[in-house]
Image (cartoon, rainbow, N blue to C red):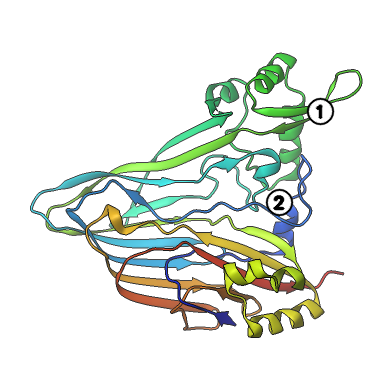
Amino acid sequence: MLRTTRRAGTLFAGLLAVGTLAAAIVSPPARANDSSARLDTGGLSFVYDARIRMASEDLFLSRSRVEVRYVFENRTDRDVETLVAFPLPKIDTGEGGNYAIDSDDPINFIDFRILVDGRPVEPKVEARAQAMGVDVTELLGRLGLPLTTVLPRDDAARTRFWERLRTLPEDGLAELERRGAIARSRDDAGKTTDVNPIWTASITFYWFQTFPAGRTIEIVHRYRPVPRDFMTGMDEIAGPDAKKRWCTDASFLATAREMADRGQLIGVDLRYVVRTAANWWGPIGRFTLTVDKESPDVFLSTCLSGLQKVGPTTFRLEKPDFMPSDDIDLLFLKSVKID
C-alpha cells in the first residue's frame, strides 16, 4: 500500500527485523527501549563547476543497500578535475549513538564504496572527533578509543569496549571528562561506576575526480543506510505528526489497524537528504528512482509523488530535467508477532 502526494526528491529505504532493533539497544549504556537513532545520509557532493552536466542519475534503495549511478558529461574541450565528497552527518556516541547498525570498522561502518567507469576507487577519509566544539581526535587515539561507538555484532566485543572505557586509568578518564568528552557516575566512595561517551564524530569520504574533455563518465557509489527502527502503535501512526511527515491516509491506517491486531507494529523512519542541483550545470537530464521494500508484508507511506508499483516489492519514479528539492521522509511498517 502506497500513499503519495505532491512532493518529489530522492530517498533511501530500509526494513528492520526485531533482532536488529534488539541488537541496537542491548549494549551499555542504557538505551531507550523501543527506538534506535538515525543518520540522514544522501548523495555525493561536488565542488561547483558549470562545465559539468549530470546527464542521468539512477537511484536504487532498499533495506540493505543504497546505490546511486551517475553519468556526468564534461561539456568542454578540456579535462576538468574537481573534489567529490560524501560527508556523513554528525555521529553521536553513547546514549545518542544507538544506531541500528554494527560493524568491525568504526569509520566506514556503512561500507561506502565507489566505482568510476566500472573500476573501484579508494577514497581518502577525513575523520575527526569533537567535544564541546573542540577537537579530541588525538586524545581518543592516545587512549586507544575508536572515533565512533559503532561496534561489531559480537556481544563479547561490545562488552569488552564498554568495560575498557569504564576502567581506563584515572588520568585518562579525568582528561576525557575535563574536555567534555564523557560523563561518568561515581559511587559514594568516589569510584567510577559508569562512563557514557558524549563526543561526536565527523567523517567525510572524498577523492579528486577527472572528467575527460568532451566525454561522459559513470560514477557509482553504494552504502548501507542507517534508519531509525522503532516500536509503535496506532496512537502514534494515526497522530498529526505522522500525517504531516508521512502522509498517512485512511487506507493506510485501516491496514495498520489490521496489522496491529496481529502483532506488534514495527516502523522504520527513513530520510534521504536531497542535494541541490547547484553544483553542476542545469537539471539532471534523466532521473530514475527505484525503491525496493524487500517484503510484501511491509507497507509504505510517503509524501513523495510519482512512485509507480512495478513489482511485488518495488516502486519506480522517472523524471526528465529533474531538479531535486525537498528531503524525503518515509514510513515502512511491519507487524511482528511476539510470543
Sort mark 2 into few (<14), some (14-19) or many (20+) by Cα contacts within 10 Å.
Answer: many
The outermost residue toward the right is 188
Which quarter of the image is occupied by the N terminus? bottom right
Between residues 126 and 135, which one lies in front from this camera angle? Answer: 135
Q: Residue at x 55, y 83 (%)?
A: 312
Q: Report which residue position mark 2 lands on.
A: 24
Is 95 rendered above or below residue 183?
below
Amino acid beneath label 2: Ala
Q: Report which residue position mark 1 lands on.
A: 185
Amino acid beneath label 1: Ser
**Mark 1, secondary structure of its residue:** strand
Between residues 254 and 44, which one lies in front from this camera angle? Answer: 254
Residue 49, horizontal then vertical, whole percent: 21, 49
Residue 307, horizontal then vertical, whole percent: 46, 79
From mark 2 to mark 1, how far is it between C-alphas? 23 Å
Is 84 rendered above or below residue 179?
below
Q: Quadrant of residue 172?
A: top right
Q: Residue at x 51, y 61 (%)?
A: 65
Is 78 rendered above or below residue 218?
above
Residue 294, horizontal then vertical, whole percent: 58, 73
